Amino acid sequence: MAMWDRIKDQAKGLQQQSQGARGSSGHGRPGSGSGSGSGSKAQLVGVLKSQLTSLKTELKSGAYRDASMAMCALVAAADGSVDPAERQHVESLILQNDVLQNFPPDQLRQRFNKHVDQLSFNFQQGKTAVMQEIAKAAKKPAEAKAVVQTGFVVAGADGYIAPAEEQVLREACAALGVSPQEFGL
């Protein structure tokens, strides 16, 4: 539990540093305050990514692998569709992810694409199947949180977390018994 408090403290510290740097110039654009949410989200993504990497040796179970691939597919399809370029982009993020390198790339690719295909064919039905897969990681709290972190890192890879992505991350938190507040959701 203390580790998650550290994450929040680090994220809060980063957010305060960035706000301090922004505020010290005194030349902010009118309305630029609205972008501060995405800035803190981007910093949170960085913190979550480094925390995930520190857990690499512990995240080797099939449940984590399968739930993470379901989570990545859900984030990719959050807006109801996944175009080929987006599928390719998320797949490359998965294969480059330090923690997910614990698993053979073919296993990751196969599971991710299976879930994307389900979600693309029938989003609501696919979402039900994907949520069941995600929920399998709920037995181990550290893995459950790591699945959400993985989803967050993938969602924030483009520097922005869309409202639809936030919504599916919140739903995944509920399925895993993880507090969405830990992730600023």
Image: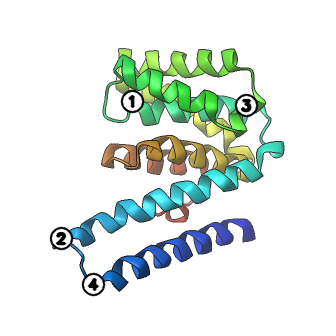
Instruction: Establish if 20 lies above or below 134.
Output: below
- Tell me which amino acid carries mark 2: Gly
Tell me the element at label 1.
Answer: loop
Who's the residue at 52% across and 17% down the image?
113
The residue where tag 1 is placed is 77
Q: Position of residue 48 (x, y in %)?
A: 60, 55
Mark 4 / mark 1, whichever is N-terminal: 4
- The nearer-to-camera label among 4 and 3 is 4
User: Could you give the CA–CA distance between mark 4 and mark 2, rounded to whole angstroms?
Assistant: 13 Å
- Density class for disc 4 (Cα within 10 Å; few <14, some 14-19, many ≥20) is few
- The nearer-to-camera label among 3 and 1 is 3
Q: Are marks 2 and 3 in contact (CB under 8 Å)?
A: no
The residue where tag 4 is placed is 26
The residue where tag 3 is placed is 101
- Tell me which amino acid carries mark 3: Gln
What is the tally of numbered marks visible in this picture? 4
- Tell me which amino acid carries mark 1: Ala
Tell me the element at label 2.
Answer: loop
- The nearer-to-camera label among 4 and 1 is 4
Q: Are marks 4 and 1 in contact (CB under 8 Å)?
A: no
Residue projecting furthest to the left? 30
Mark 3 / mark 1, whichever is N-terminal: 1
Quarter occupied by residue 58: top right
User: Could you give the CA–CA distance between mark 2 and mark 3, rounded to whole angstroms?
Assistant: 41 Å
User: Could you give the CA–CA distance between mark 4 and mark 1, rounded to whole angstroms?
Assistant: 40 Å
- Tell me which amino acid carries mark 4: Gly
**Viewer-closest of 14 and 126:** 14
Q: Position of residue 99 (x, y in %)?
A: 71, 39
The residue where tag 2 is placed is 31
- Density class for disc 1 (Cα within 10 Å; few <14, some 14-19, many ≥20) is many
Mark 1 / mark 2, whichever is N-terminal: 2
- Residue 75 in sight: yes
